[in-house]
């Protein structure tokens, strides 16, 4: 399994090359209009990357690490009590006016607090998924899709950490970063779009093709 993961990781670099090539195509297209316009698009992309990706990453690193899991069963009760005490300072719950008076410091109390936060976490996740769906549909470019996926992923993680009033360890941050990297490599490449389009072509072959504008509709669905 490790060998397969390494092969996939190495292949992802080839996909990133295709994404970078699309960026070069955008730059050359704009530069063909005027050299200053080419430099302008570079500065614009750098500014967007800094504001929507660089700043959120910095804010994630600045968030204090929350109490992580433990392998020792004897440490669980004390750790759970510390988590409950930490969550009692949660800005979201305090702003909401959540009543902590009947919350115990054991596992049941911890689950009650987490259960109160989870609906808001799902709302945040759904908001970013919807935004990414619509923005990537408009972009129609692998490089821009990669930027959008990167930005949405980083900001989603940042907001969830703020919501739970703490982030995971640096080791777990690297695991999340790896998953974001694969999302960029897959979502920003044309390979997935091509495969999806081929599947839709097989499914819609025959009489459906005779419907006016059907090819445009299914092309958009594939995108």
Image (tube, rainbow, N blue to C red):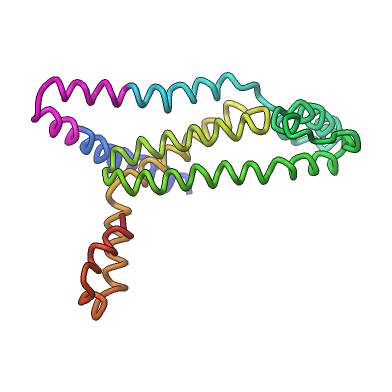
Residue 76: quarter of image: top right
Residue shown at 43%/27% (left/top)? 53
| Residue furthest out toward the bottom | 207
Q: Seen in the image, is 38 located left or right of residue 74?
A: left
User: Image point 52% across, 44% down: which residue?
Assistant: 127
Q: How many numbered callouts?
A: 0
Percent of width and height locating residue 145 = 33, 41
**Residue 106 placed where, x, y %?**
87, 38
Q: Quadrant of residue 200?
A: bottom left
Work out whether 201 lies above or below 52: below
Task: Choose between 39 and 143: the one closer to the eye.
Answer: 39
Q: Which residues are magenta?
A: 24-46
Q: Is residue 40 magenta?
A: yes
The part of the image, by quadrant, that contains residue 92 is top right
- Image location of residue 23, percent across then percent down: 23, 34
**In this orientation, which residue lies closer to the viewer: 135 or 54?**
135
Residue 103 picture location, percent across and down: 88, 37
Q: Is residue 179 left or right of residue 92?
A: left
Indicate whether residue 222 is drawn in magenta: no
Q: Which residue does the image show at 62% across and 27% down from the upper left? A: 169
As displayed, is residue 43 above or below residue 155? above
The foreground one among 4 and 147 is 147
Task: Please identify the dominant SS of the magenta region.
Answer: helix
The quadrant of the image that shows the C terminus is bottom left
User: 195 left or right of 117?
Assistant: left
Residue drawn 11% across the image and 22% down it: 35
């Amino acid at each position: 399994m490790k060998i397969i993961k390494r092969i996939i990781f190495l292949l992802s670099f080839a996909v990133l090359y295709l994404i970078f090539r699309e960026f070069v195509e955008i730059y050359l297209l704009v530069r063909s209009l005027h050299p200053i316009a080419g430099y302008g698009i570079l500065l614009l992309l750098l500014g967007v990357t800094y504001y929507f990706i660089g700043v959120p990453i910095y804010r994630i690193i600045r968030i204090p690490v929350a109490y992580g899991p433990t392998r020792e069963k004897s440490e669980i009760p004390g750790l759970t009590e510390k988590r409950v005490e930490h969550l009692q300072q949660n800005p979201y719950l305090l702003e909401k006016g959540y009543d902590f008076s009947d919350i115990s410091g054991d596992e049941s109390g911890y689950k009650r607090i987490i259960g109160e936060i989870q609906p808001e976490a799902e709302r945040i996740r759904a908001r970013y998924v919807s935004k990414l769906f619509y923005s990537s549909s408009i972009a129609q470019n692998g490089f821009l899709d990669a930027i959008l996926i990167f930005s949405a992923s980083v900001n989603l993680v940042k907001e969830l950490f703020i919501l739970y009033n703490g982030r995971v360890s640096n080791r777990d941050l690297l695991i999340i970063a790896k998953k974001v990297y694969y999302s960029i490599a897959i979502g920003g490449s044309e390979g997935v779009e091509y495969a999806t389009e081929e599947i839709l072509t097989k499914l819609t072959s025959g009489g459906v093709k005779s419907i006016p504008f059907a090819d445009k509709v299914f092309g958009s669905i594939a995108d």
